[in-house]
Amino acid sequence: MNSLIKLEITRALRNRKFLFFSVIYPAGLFLLIAGGADSHTKIDGTGLTLPTYMMVSMASFGALTAVLMGNSERIAKERESGWVRQLRLTTLPGRGYVLAKTASAAVVSLPSIVVVFLVAAAVKDVRLDAWQWCALSGAIWAGSLVFAALGVALGYLASGDAVRPITMIIYFGLSMLGGLWMPTTTFPQWLQDVAKWLPTHAYASLGRAIEQSQTPHTQDIAVLVVSFVVFAGGAAWLYRKDTLKA
């Protein structure tokens, strides 16, 4: 399994288009949204300035891009090319394949988080304590495992032709409704109530709690844990189902 993880990481790092969208694109969006914003005026109901608020949003968005988009399309293509069938002939267990895909995607998501942080600190003068930077990096990186598991599930759910539009709908839907592109406080109340139960909203809320030196809400942690169990369980079930078809 370790060899497969190394192979997956190497393949991802060689894909320039993937690196652009997962590493450069989120930092560019941060500059587009927060570049001209006042670094002192705080967003109502958050106690955070727009650059500080959007830093967590775009770091989360970058990690989401790396693990969700990368996993789903790659797995669907591997199924069609016969690569997954070849792996089944080895001693690698099914859970090993799913774990390798999830772990490698999470490792690749780390640069996207770091680049957004560096841009926010250098361009918008975002300042946090050392423990907050470390806690933010750890929380956003660990939270990306939820969406890495979702990417694996989507890769087994759809064929190579259908996986991209399905993934894009879920990707943009979760990003927008979860408040990664704009504060959810700008939503109608009914939509705010819906957003609170989305894993992307809970994901970003963990980081914002750290920025505010607060304890993360129990509901946010519960949403992420339940989402990971559902997505990982779905990925394992779809993998076994795909094995029976083969």
Image (cartoon, helix red, strand yellow):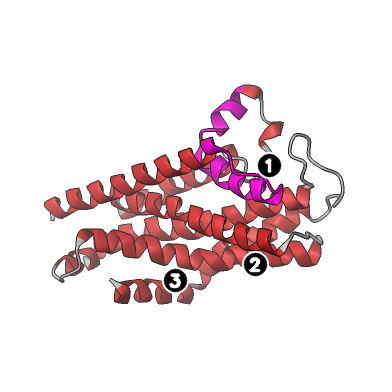
Q: Secondary structure at mark 3?
A: helix
* x then y, percent, for residue 214: 67, 45
Q: Image quadrant for the C terminus?
A: bottom left
Q: Where does label 3 land, which residue? A: 12
Amino acid on which the number 1 mark rests in the picture: Met
Amino acid on which the number 3 mark rests in the picture: Ala
Q: State which tag comes first along the sequence, 2 or 3.
A: 3
Q: CA distance from mark 1 to mark 3?
A: 29 Å
Q: Secondary structure at mark 2?
A: helix
Amino acid on which the number 2 mark rests in the picture: Val
Residue drawn at x 60%, y 62% is 113
Q: Which residues are magenta?
A: 190-218
Q: Secondary structure at mark 1?
A: loop
Seen in the picture, residue 48 relative to 103 is either above or below; the reply is above
**The label number, if any, that marks residue 115 in the structure image:** 2
* x then y, percent, for residue 93: 19, 63
Q: Is residue 245 left or right of residue 182?
A: left
Q: State which tag comes first along the sequence, 1 or 3.
A: 3
Q: Residue furthest top?
A: 190
**The label number, if any, that marks residue 20 in the structure image:** none
Q: Is residue 246 magenta?
A: no
Residue drawn at x 38%, y 60% is 102
Q: Nearer the viewer, residue 35 or 220?
A: 220
Q: Where does label 1 land, which residue? A: 182
Q: State which tag comes first along the sequence, 1 or 2.
A: 2
Seen in the picture, residue 105 relative to 148 is either above or below; the reply is below
Q: Is residue 4 left or right of residue 42?
A: left
